[in-house]
């Protein structure tokens, strides 16, 4: 392990999915993302459905090959790794998937599901692996005697605990939580979030936490990155981005959070974005948000020049907007 405080660096990452027929072209799911994740922190990643969050997560974990760009994990460029070199890195990074029903093989027992990563990397003897499976179940708050049960015998929250246990099996240092609580009831969400926080403290884990619920993201994250149409448009500490957002899209997202006070909620004036989300096949020129932006100046710089991610607002806060902070 290096002394670099940055565990993961994403530099100019692109992922385009070619379209066959209909005139060709490509879906530009991730289109030039720069991102850094520090050791031991939780970076929250938010944005509308279809903005490229999950695709970016799969690029970072090497489940998808990048079209272009560089991904450096723990000091090593993993963008073009293949074979045993990639397998060695994969042991350090794992993923918790969104759907606790689809992410577990219904034909395998819980014991087999949790032992599979240990078998894959030939970790310990068979007795050690069986002992590790029971330890993992205890870690996530499940009965260690559940090893012979099948996924259909568990509730959604219990299945997600099994998914978390599977991610922990090989002692990773980095875990991607891809909408890990969005399919769960609110009360179960709280339990899973508390579990993730406890595990992070116990094992010094680093998280990339992808979610739609901005209240959940604020509770769990140290820093937050906002994506729009394949690009990161703002990154800042959680308090800075909620109290002093600089990008108009971030402000619109935050204004959509309901306030649990009827009197305050009635007085609020949420920002209403006009128009449809542009297609990632043919994104707008200049700033991609300008067709829906309440402060855009078009025709003009917003429709002609793409704004770079630059420092605005608080320390370590960056935003991609020509008129950041003016809305």
Image: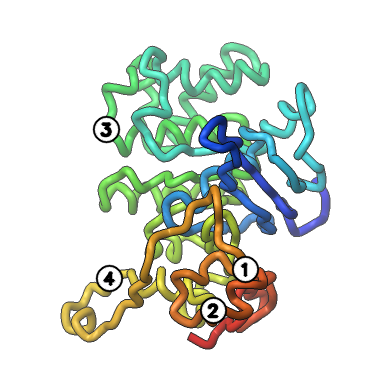
**Foreground residue, 184 or 18?**
18
- What residue is drawn where x is 47% and y is 71%? 249
Q: Is residue 68 above or below residue 221?
A: above
**Foreground residue, 115 or 223?**
223
Q: Secondary structure at mark 1?
A: loop
- Residue tagged 1: 286
The disc, 2 or 4, on the residue closer to the chain's N-terminal end is: 4
Q: Which mark is residue 81?
A: none
Q: Which mark is residue 258?
A: 4
Task: Using the numbered discs, state the Cα–Cα distance from disc 4 to disc 1 in whole angstroms.
Answer: 32 Å
**Foreground residue, 276 or 95?**
276
Q: Nearer the viewer, mark 1 or mark 3?
A: 1
Residue lying farthest left? 262
Q: Which mark is residue 155?
A: 3
Number of residues whose C-alpha sits closer than 10 Å to that of mark 4, classed few (under 14), some (14–19) or many (20 or more): few
The answer to whether the residues at label 1 and label 2 have Cβ atoms under 8 Å apart is: yes
Q: Nearer the viewer, mark 3 or mark 2?
A: 2
């Amino acid at each position: 392990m290096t002394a670099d405080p940055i565990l993961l660096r994403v530099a100019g990452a692109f992922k385009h999915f070619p379209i066959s027929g209909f005139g060709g072209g490509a879906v530009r799911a991730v289109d030039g993302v720069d991102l850094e994740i520090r050791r031991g922190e939780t970076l929250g990643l938010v944005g509308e459905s279809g903005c490229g969050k999950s695709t970016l997560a799969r690029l970072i974990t090497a489940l998808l090959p990048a079209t272009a760009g560089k991904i450096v994990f723990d000091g090593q460029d993993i963008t073009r790794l293949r074979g045993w070199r990639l397998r060695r890195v994969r042991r350090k990074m794992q993923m918790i998937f969104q759907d606790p029903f689809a992410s577990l093989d219904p034909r395998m027992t819980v014991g087999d599901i949790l032992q599979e990563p240990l078998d894959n990397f030939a970790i310990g003897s068979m007795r050690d692996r069986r002992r590790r499976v029971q330890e993992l179940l205890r870690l996530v708050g499940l009965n260690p005697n559940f090893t012979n049960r099948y996924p259909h015998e568990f509730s959604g929250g219990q299945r997600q605990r099994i998914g978390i246990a599977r991610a922990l099996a090989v002692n990773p240092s980095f875990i991607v939580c891809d909408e890990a609580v969005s399919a769960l009831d609110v009360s179960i969400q709280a339990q899973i979030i508390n579990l993730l926080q406890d595990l992070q403290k116990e094992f010094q884990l680093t998280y990339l936490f992808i979610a739609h619920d901005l209240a959940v993201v604020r509770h769990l994250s140290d820093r937050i990155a906002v994506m729009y149409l394949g690009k990161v448009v703002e990154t800042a500490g959680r308090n800075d981005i909620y109290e002093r957002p600089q990008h108009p899209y971030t402000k619109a997202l935050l204004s959509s959070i309901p306030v649990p006070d009827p009197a305050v909620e009635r007085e609020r004036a949420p920002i209403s974005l006009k128009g449809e989300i542009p297609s990632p096949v043919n994104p707008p020129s200049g700033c991609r948000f300008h067709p829906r932006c309440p402060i855009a100046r078009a025709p003009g710089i917003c429709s002609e020049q793409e704004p770079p991610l630059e420092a605005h607002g608080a320390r370590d806060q960056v935003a991609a907007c020509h008129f950041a902070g003016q809305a």
